[in-house]
Image: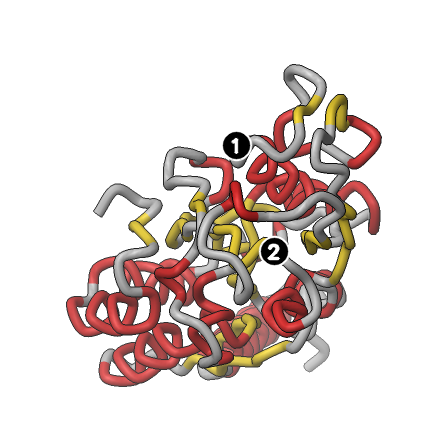
């Protein structure tokens, strides 16, 4: 006997269809949850993150660490969806990347803040620098501004009032020793120490290079600039990702990770989350 489309058979079919769709959705979610969390970073921050990856595995969380050799690819790769988060930059750098490249990346959670210093293989004190000394700073707009702030703190230049980390060489008001400022990619600064008189330096890269004591800076910029806290960064669609939340908690709270941070950065860092 023919059944009406709205009869009992039709209702059963609808229920079966909905049940099937729900099962497919749950299976898709389970498959997605089984995928590793992909986190991009750079060599300077990798060792403690590797320890965090191992600790995460003990909790059943799969994390894949992808190491980049520059400061451009981690954001480009994240924006294109090939990784889920990155960890290598502070908020001023992120804001500049979003502005210049049109990204919509967001800070997810704070990591550590590192000292940055002025290093030299030729001189023991800032006052010993000769006139016309060659000084290398970072070439990107944000870290270059941080370098110029360091040079001002050292008394080598003065900057326009209020420019802060957005300073450029155009903002230099006085340069009494007529130092020659050379701009290089930040990760290359440590290699420039043989060719210049003074260079802005990142202790973690200097430690990796192994050619200089990272504690030997002629001047440090101090740890009182919260804008320079390194951030876990992600896309808006991952702002509620429970995997990322769990991984960040491991990084921030695990005693094993803290020991790895101490080993990697010595005393030249502090937790940006107040831990």
Q: Position of residue 9 (x, y in %)?
A: 60, 74
Other residues around mark 1 within 10 Å, as few (<14) / some (14–19) / many (≥20): some
Quarter the N terminus occupies: bottom right
Residue 187, can we see it?
yes
Please give the name of the residue rendered at 72% of the width and 54% of the height, measured from the top-left corner. Answer: 134
Residue 198 - label: 2
**Where does the image place residue 73, in percent across and percent down from the top left?**
72, 69
Q: Secondary structure at mark 2?
A: strand
Residue 108, labelled with which disc? Answer: none
Viewer-closest of 79 and 30: 79
Report the side of 23 relative to 216 (left or right): right
On screen, residue 79 versus residue 223, left or right, reads: right
When the figure is inspected, residue 42 is found, relative to residue 66, above or below; the finding is: above
Whether 216 is drawn above or below 161: the answer is below
Q: Which residue is mark 1?
A: 153
Protein image colouring: secondary structure
Relative depth, front residue between 260 and 98: 260
Image point (30%, 50%), residue name: 271
Query: Quick one: label 1 or label 2, which is nearer the N terminus?
Result: 1
């Amino acid at each position: 006997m023919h059944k009406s489309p709205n009869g009992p058979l039709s209702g059963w079919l609808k229920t079966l269809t909905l049940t099937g769709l729900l099962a497919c959705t749950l299976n898709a979610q389970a498959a997605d949850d089984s995928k590793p969390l992909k986190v991009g970073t750079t060599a300077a921050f990798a060792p403690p993150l590797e320890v965090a990856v191992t600790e995460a595995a003990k909790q059943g969380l799969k994390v894949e660490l992808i190491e980049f050799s520059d400061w451009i690819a981690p954001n480009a790769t994240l924006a294109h969806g090939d990784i889920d988060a990155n960890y290598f930059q502070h908020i001023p750098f992120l804001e500049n990347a979003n502005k210049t490249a049109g990204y919509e990346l967001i800070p997810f959670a704070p990591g550590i803040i590192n000292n940055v210093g002025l290093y030299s293989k030729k001189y023991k004190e800032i006052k010993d620098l000769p006139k016309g000394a060659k000084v290398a700073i970072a070439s990107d707009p944000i870290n270059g501004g941080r370098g110029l702030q360091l040079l001002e703190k050292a008394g080598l230049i003065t900057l326009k009032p209020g420019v802060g980390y957005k300073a450029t060489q155009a903002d230099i008001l006085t340069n009494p020793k007529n130092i020659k400022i050379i701009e290089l990619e930040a990760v290359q600064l440590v290699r420039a120490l043989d060719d210049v008189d003074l260079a802005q330096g990142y202790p973690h890269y200097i430690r990796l290079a192994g050619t200089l004591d990272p504690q030997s800076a002629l001047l440090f910029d101090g740890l009182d600039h919260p804008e320079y806290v390194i951030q876990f960064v992600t896309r808006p669609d991952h702002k509620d990702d429970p995997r990322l939340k769990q991984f960040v908690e491991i990084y921030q709270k695990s005693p094993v990770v803290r020991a790895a941070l101490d080993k990697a950065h010595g005393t030249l860092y502090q937790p940006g989350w107040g831990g």
